[in-house]
Image (cartoon, helix red, strand yellow):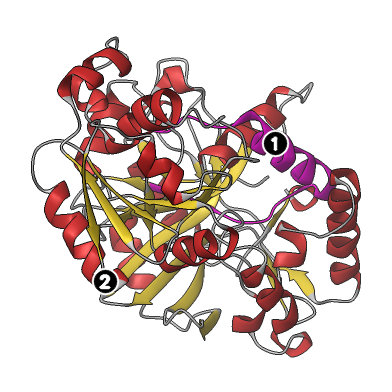
C-alpha cells in the first residue's frame, strides 16, 4: 500500500495518534461496460430492503454491486464463494478496473437539501482503547461473521463505512484541498433514483496528500455508519500473521463541522408479535393512544411526544398507528440497567430493549424475531403484510451520540442511522492491489 509519509511514532507524533487515511488504487466500474453508473450502485448492504429492494437492484443491471454485497445462494458459503467468483470475473471482463495509481478520493453527494463532501481512503485500523475511532453502538456477532466471510473470500472492501470528524478552519489542511479539487473535472458524475447526485474526484498530488495526512493526524472520528463492518475489519486484521493491507479498511470521512450529517432512526420489525398482542401485554406500562390518520400525521404525533419528557414509540401493523408515551417511572427503575450514564438510561433504544422487548414482550434478541429497517414506510408495509409489529422510533440527537461515545459508552445496537450514506459501487478497494 502506498501511504503518505509518517514519523516513526516513537514519540507519539500527532500523525501516529490520530487518523491515518492512506491512498489506494480504487477499483471502479468502466462506464462503457455497464448500462449506467446509477444502475450498478446500491445502498449499503444493511439498508437494502429485502426482498423487494434486492430484486429491484438485481434487475436494474446484471452488474449491479448488490450481487457482490448481498449475493444470493443456498448457503452462506455458497453466497460468499459466488461473490468472489463474480468479482474476479468482472475484473477479467473489464467491467471493473483499477485506477492507475493510489489516490484518496473526494466524494460529494447532493440532494434533498443536503450537500455532503468527504474523503474516501484506506483508514489505519486502531483498537478502541486508542480513542482514534469511537464506536457508539453494540454489534451482533452473526453479522460480523457473515461480513468477515464475505471480505475474506472476495479479498476486498466492497463499500466504504461512513465516519464523521470535526475538522479545523485551516485552508491548507484537508478542507482546503477538498475545496480546490472540486473545482476540477470529476472522475465520475451520476444521479441515483433516491434523488441524490454523486461526484467523485481523485487526489494523487504528494503535497495535497501530505497536507491531508498532517491535518487528519490531529483528529479522531465517530463511526456514523458501519459498526459491524468496522468490527469485521478488526477481526480480519487480527487473523493476519504480519502487517499488510488488512491493517487498513475502506471509509468515507466527513468533516461534520462543515457538512453536518442527518440522524435518523432505525425501526424494529417484530416478526412474530401481532400488534394486538403487543398492545394487550402493555397493561399500564405506557399511555397508549390510537391514531387513525396517515403515516405522516402519525410521525408528527410521535415527534411531538418525543419532544416532551420520557420516551415515545409508534406501533404499526394492523392498519392503524398506536402512540406509546409516558412510561411508568417505577417500571423504568426496575428494568433499565443502572450501571450506565443517565443519558444512556433515557435513550429510546435503551427503554425499548430493556423494558418492552425483554421485560414486557419477551421477544428473543435474534434475527428470527427482530428485524431492523431504516425506511419508515417499508417497516409499516412489512408489518402489515406479515402480521407483525413495526416499532417506529424517533431519532436521537448527534450530540448525545458523540457525548456517550467519548465516554466509552455504547448505545443499543441499531440505535441511529446517520446519512446520507455513501452509494455502494462507486469505488471499491481490492486488497490484492494494496
Q: Nearer the viewer, mark 2 or mark 1?
A: 2
Residue at the spot of label 2: 296
Whether residue 160 is in magenta: the answer is yes
Position of residue 354 relative to residue 218, above or below, is above
Residue at the spot of label 1: 246
Where are the magenta residues, as a range?
A: 136-163
Position of residue 205 relative to residue 345, above or below, is below
Whether residue 145 is in magenta: the answer is yes
Q: Judging from the image, what secondary structure is the residue with disc 2 in?
A: helix
Position of residue 194 relative to residue 132, above or below, is below
- C-alpha span from label 2 to label 1: 45 Å
Residue sitting nearer the eye, 29 or 354: 354
State left or right for residue 93 relative to residue 54: right
- Identify the residue at horizontal 71%, vertical 58% (top origin): 69
State the image quarter where residue 151 is shown. top right
Residue sitting nearer the eye, 433 or 330: 330
- The reply to whether residue 135 is visible in this rendering is no
Amino acid at each position: 500500500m502506498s501511504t503518505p509519509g509518517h514519523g516513526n511514532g516513537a514519540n507519539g507524533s500527532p500523525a501516529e495518534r490520530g487518523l491515518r487515511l492512506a491512498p489506494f488504487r480504487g477499483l471502479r466500474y468502466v462506464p462503457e461496460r455497464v448500462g449506467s453508473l446509477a444502475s450498478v450502485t446500491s445502498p449499503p448492504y444493511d439498508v437494502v430492503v429485502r426482498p423487494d429492494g434486492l430484486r429491484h437492484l438485481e434487475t436494474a443491471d446484471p452488474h449491479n454491486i448488490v450481487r457482490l454485497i448481498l449475493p444470493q445462494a443456498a448457503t452462506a458459503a455458497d453466497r460468499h464463494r459466488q461473490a468472489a467468483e463474480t468479482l474476479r470475473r468482472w475484473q477479467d471482463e473489464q467491467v471493473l478496473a483499477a485506477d492507475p495509481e493510489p489516490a484518496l478520493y473526494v466524494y460529494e453527494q447532493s440532494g434533498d437539501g443536503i450537500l455532503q463532501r468527504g474523503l474516501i481512503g484506506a483508514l489505519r485500523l486502531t483498537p478502541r482503547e486508542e480513542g482514534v475511532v469511537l464506536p457508539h453502538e453494540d454489534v451482533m456477532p452473526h453479522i460480523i461473521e457473515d461480513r468477515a466471510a464475505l471480505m475474506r473470500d472476495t479479498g476486498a472492501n466492497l463499500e466504504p463505512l461512513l465516519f464523521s470528524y470535526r475538522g479545523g478552519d485551516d485552508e491548507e489542511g484537508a478542507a482546503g484541498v477538498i475545496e480546490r479539487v472540486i473545482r476540477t473535472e470529476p472522475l465520475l458524475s451520476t444521479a441515483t433514483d433516491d434523488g441524490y447526485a454523486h461526484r467523485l474526484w481523485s487526489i494523487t498530488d504528494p503535497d495535497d496528500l501530505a497536507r491531508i495526512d498532517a491535518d487528519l493526524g490531529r483528529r479522531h472520528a465517530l463511526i456514523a455508519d458501519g459498526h459491524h463492518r468496522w468490527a469485521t475489519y478488526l477481526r480480519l486484521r487480527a487473523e493476519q500473521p504480519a502487517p499488510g493491507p488488512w491493517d487498513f479498511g475502506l471509509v468515507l470521512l466527513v468533516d461534520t463541522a462543515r457538512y453536518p450529517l442527518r440522524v435518523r432512526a432505525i425501526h424494529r420489525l417484530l416478526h412474530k408479535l401481532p400488534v394486538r398482542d403487543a398492545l394487550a401485554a402493555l397493561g399500564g406500562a405506557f399511555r397508549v393512544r390510537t391514531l387513525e390518520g396517515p403515516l405522516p400525521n402519525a410521525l408528527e404525533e410521535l415527534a411531538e411526544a418525543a419532544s416532551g419528557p420520557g420516551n415515545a414509540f409508534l406501533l404499526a401493523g394492523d392498519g392503524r398507528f398506536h402512540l406509546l408515551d409516558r412510561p411508568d417511572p417505577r417500571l423504568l427503575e426496575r428494568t433499565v440497567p443502572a450501571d450506565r450514564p443517565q443519558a444512556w438510561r433515557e435513550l429510546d433504544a435503551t427503554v425499548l430493549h430493556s423494558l418492552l422487548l425483554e421485560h414486557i414482550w419477551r421477544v428473543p434478541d435474534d434475527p428470527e424475531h427482530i428485524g431492523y429497517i431504516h425506511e419508515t414506510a417499508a417497516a409499516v408495509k412489512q408489518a402489515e403484510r406479515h402480521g407483525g409489529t413495526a416499532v417506529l422510533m424517533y431519532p436521537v440527537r448527534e450530540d448525545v451520540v458523540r457525548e456517550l461515545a467519548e465516554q466509552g459508552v455504547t448505545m443499543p445496537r441499531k440505535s441511529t442511522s446517520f446519512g446520507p450514506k455513501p452509494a455502494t459501487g462507486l469505488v471499491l478497494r481490492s486488497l490484492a492491489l494494496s
